[in-house]
Image (cartoon, rainbow, N blue to C red):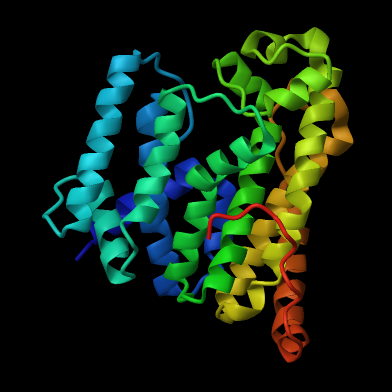
Amino acid sequence: MTDAVLAASKESITRGSKSFRSASRLFDPQVREDAWLLYAWCRRCDDEIDGQDHGHGQEALSREEQERRLARLYDLTRRALAGETMADPTFAAFQRVALRHQLPERWPLDLIDGFAMDVAQTPYRTLEDVLAYCWHVAGVVGVMMARVMGASDPLVLRRAQDLGLAFQLTNISRDVIEDARNGRVYLPSEWLVEAGLTPTPEAVADPANRAAVHDVARRLLDVAEPYYDSAREGLRSLPFRSSLAIAAARGVYREIGRKVVRDGPRVWDRRAVVGKGAKLWLFSRGLLIAFWTRLLDRGRPAPDRPDMWTRV
């Protein structure tokens, strides 16, 4: 019998993220399926607020409509966690993975809180403000994924959070012009002012300001690097195939950030992506890193995590 919930979740990740879809193939079957289930719900929540379809298109939504959709997301998520029968396959998928792994209610609600920040058009004055947003829309996803992979140690969950933070800092730097055109600025306004810019979407999107905006984006990517390093230290605590998949995804996303740095202000002429050849190399490198952490790192204590922002 076809598992309609799982099939819909697989279709969601196939349409929504080629990078994560490729990396998910490296998980063992049960973790892979649970990752698809969780991804489908995360993608749906994001799309609901942005008026998109798997990250594509942009339906203009009124503030009232966004708030209505936000309230619905909170309601359906709470009902799914309470064990109610879910007619919507996306929330049935979320319910399946959340109950199987006993995800605390605060984690999925924290994710939706991040979308609430978008609806409220929350300003991000400081780096700490940006990192708090990154927690809500990505760090907490890393923590939930770690739980799906069998992790429960707070130290391991913190490393998973760090990878989510690094991913989102990379996303912000890659998408800064597109976000500004949609009326959103996630770069710290203090940094924009220091760069001589008015911290408004119009100023960030202005082609005349590309060089200054790139300097700020590059500064944000510098912040991401120690979070990527910290995440590597958590790989040894995951099952081997999970560490392989996460190492691969880490490599691909980190390369996107490096491409933003290398290409300079012209990087935003088109969306920064990692080509198939580079992705294959990075996946192979992820395999080596996974083996390294499995065979060599396990014999030594993990270094202390630097004194960085954390929510875990």
Identity of the residue furthest to the bottom in this view = 299
Q: How many marks can you see?
A: 0
Residue at position x 28%, y 55% from top? 93
Q: Residue 272 or 195: which is nearer the viewer?
A: 195
Kindly give the residue lying farthest to the left in the view shown: 85
The answer to whether residue 296 is left or right of residue 147 is right
Is residue 292 visible to the viewer in this orientation of the structure? yes
> Which residue is pictured at 36% across the width and 40% down the height?
44
User: Does residue 280 appear anywhere in the picture?
Assistant: no
Q: Quarter-wise, where is residue 156 in the image?
A: bottom right
Locate the N terminus by quadrant: bottom left
**Is 223 placed left or right of 59 in the picture?**
right
User: Residue 136, position in %: x, y?
Assistant: 48, 44
| Residue 296 position in % (x across, y down) | 78, 87
Q: In this view, does 54 lie above or below 239?
A: above
Which residue: 49% across, 75% down?
Answer: 151
Q: Is 215 situated above or below 262?
A: above
Query: Which quadrant holds residue 288?
Result: bottom right
- Is 9 located above or below residue 230 in the figure? above
Q: Residue at the location (58% across, 53% down)?
A: 164
Percent position (x, y) of residue 137? 49, 43
Q: Nearer the viewer, residue 10 or 96?
A: 96
Relative horizontal placement of residue 271, taking residue 118 as reference (left or right):
right
Is 215 placed above or below 281 here? above
